[in-house]
Structure formats: structure tokens, C-alpha cells
Image (tube, helix red, strand yellow):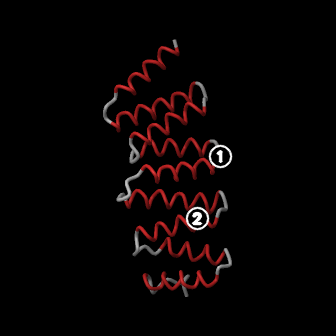
Amino acid sequence: GRNDNVEKRNEMIKKARDPEKRAELHVRAAEMIQRVRDDETATLEHLQAALKAAPKNPRALAAAERFYQELEDPRGLAALYAAQLGRLDRDDREGRTRILDRLAQVRRYDLRDLEGALEALEAIAALDPAAVKPREDAARLLTELGQDDEAAVAWRGVLERDPLSADAW
């Protein structure tokens, strides 16, 4: 019955040598568990295992994001992104920037953690010194937080990179 299927699936996952294949099997297992048993713990274990096996696997990340969004759990989503940053190579600037951007959004809009959002935006700016948007967003947050001196410095940084930025004027 069901336990035999679970055993077979787990054996397949263990035997999979390729990390991408193992991640895919974990995602499928998570989706099946969610559909059949609605077991959040088992679902999450498979999603985390998928991301651990292949941190850059877009399907694994999308499935984990969906899981937290369906639970309406922005704290879980923020924790997912923070853990994902730890899984990505330090030199994966594009991947880290994408995750940091999502983390900043969740912290700012869902959790109202403006300091945490600012931290993520500053990390993006450090990864991409020419980027304007994270600096604009950081300047807005600093203004919102009442940190006017820091906001003025941030807006000057925006103008240095984009002299036509209407918001900075």
C-alpha cells in the first residue's frame, strides 16, 4: 500500500547520484505528500532536502516558496530565503542578488521589518555597486525610518549612479 510507495520513493531518492535528479525527486515527493496526506512537516523536509541537494534548482525554490505562500507564512518564507543564501556559493552574485531582493520584499512588505529589509538591500548594493534600485529602495526606507542623514547620503549615492533620478531630487 501507501507505505510500500513511500519506501520505494525514499529508495529512489537515496540511489539518485545526480544532485539535480535527487532535488527533483524530493520536490515530487513533497508535492505528492502535500496532495495526499497534507503533512506539512514531511513536505517541508523534502523541500529542504531538495534545496540542500541542488541550491540553484529553480523548481525546488519555487515549490518551497509556494509552500510558505499557501500557508500564509511570511516568517517561514523569510527563513527560507535566509537559509538559501547560506546554501548558495559566495561567488554566485546573480543568485544571491535574486534571493536578497525577495528577502527584502518579504521583510519590508509582509513582515514590516524595515531594518531587516534595509540590511538585505545593502547586501544587494555591495554585490552590485552599479545597481540603482536597491539604493533607491534603501534611501526610501531610511527616510521612512526617520534616519534623515543616512537617507541623504543614500540619495546622493543614487544620483551618482543615475543623475536623472527624479526621486533623488
Residue at x 55% of width, y 43% of height:
66
**Residue farthest toward the top in the current orientation of the protein:** 1
Mark earlier in primary sequence (2, 1)? 1
Residue that mark 1 sits on: 72
**Residue farthest toward the left in the current orientation of the protein:** 18
Q: Quadrant of residue 140?
A: bottom right
Q: Amino acid at mark 2?
A: Ala
Numbered-mark total: 2
Residue at x 54% of width, y 28% of height:
33
Q: Quadrant of residue 142?
A: bottom right
User: Callout 1: 10 Å neighbours few (<14), some, many (20+)?
Assistant: few
> What's the distance in space between the residues labelled 2 and 1, CA to CA?
19 Å
Q: Is residue 48 above or below residue 35?
A: below
Residue at x 38% of width, y 58% of height:
90
Q: Is residue 23 above or below residue 157?
A: above
Residue at x 57% of width, y 77% of height:
139
Percent position (x, y) of residue 158? Answer: 48, 81
Q: Secondary structure at mark 1?
A: loop
Percent position (x, y) of residue 109? Answer: 63, 61
Q: Amino acid at mark 1?
A: Glu
Residue that mark 2 sits on: 117
Q: Nearer the viewer, mark 2 or mark 1?
A: 2
Quarter of the picture containing the C terminus is bottom right
Percent position (x, y) of residue 98? Answer: 45, 58
User: Callout 2: 10 Å neighbours few (<14), some, many (20+)?
Assistant: many
Percent position (x, y) of residue 82? Answer: 52, 53
